[in-house]
Image (tube, grey):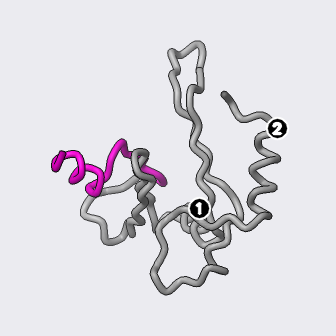
Amino acid sequence: MIMDFVDKLHAKIELAGGLSCALKHHPDDSKAEMQAVDFIYQGWGTDDGLVAEIKRETLIPVCATCAKSLTNNEWALQFCMNCANSKWIWKLYSERCIEWKIQWTPYCPKCHESFRTR
């Protein structure tokens, strides 16, 4: 299902209802600072060059601080699609050259460990 106008409006109303940011924060951050103000939206599906088909969507509430971090070039975000764990990477101190803003991973080290212990 692709989000239509009504779905987007409903999501904005939920923001006004007091959703918290779903991304990782410093333990000292207050709840007020983590009040969600917008969403990260990602559609998942196929694109054969002629027709793009969205089969699944991800909607992640974000606070003003996280939204600002995603718009500058200092930070990158890793987001685990399996457990919704997130990790901020400061590009200046990264060992790799990071050119992306958000890296969507199928699993993270936390998930990977739980897979290995089964």
Indicate the amino acid at tag 1: Thr
Q: Is residue 106 magenta?
A: yes
Q: Position of residue 82 (x, y in %)?
A: 40, 45
Q: Is residue 76 magenta?
A: no
Q: Earlier in the sequence, mark 2 or mark 1?
A: 2
Instruction: State the image quarter where residue 55 is shown.
Output: top right
Instruction: State the image quarter where residue 15 is shown.
Output: bottom right
Q: Position of residue 6 (x, y in %)?
A: 83, 39
**The disc label shown at residue 5, or none:** 2
Q: Position of residue 18 (x, y in %)?
A: 73, 68
**The disc label shown at residue 41, or none:** none
Q: Relative to residue 24, is residue 44 depicted above or below?
A: above
User: What separation in Å lies between label 2 and label 1 (alpha carbons)?
Assistant: 25 Å
Magenta region:
101-118
Q: Residue at x 57, y 67 (%)?
A: 66
| Image quarter hosting the C terminus | top left
Task: Out of 61 and 72, give the one closest to the viewer.
Answer: 61
Instruction: Give the foreground label among 2 and 1.
Output: 2
**Residue furthest to the top:** 50
Indicate the amino acid at tag 2: Phe
Circle 1 residues within 10 Å: few <14, some 14–19, many ≥20: few
Circle 2 residues within 10 Å: few <14, some 14–19, many ≥20: few
Task: Out of 31 and 54, give the one closest to the viewer.
Answer: 31
Q: Residue at x 24, y 51 (%)?
A: 114
Q: Relative to residue 74, is residue 43 depicted above or below?
A: above
**The disc label shown at residue 71, or none:** 1
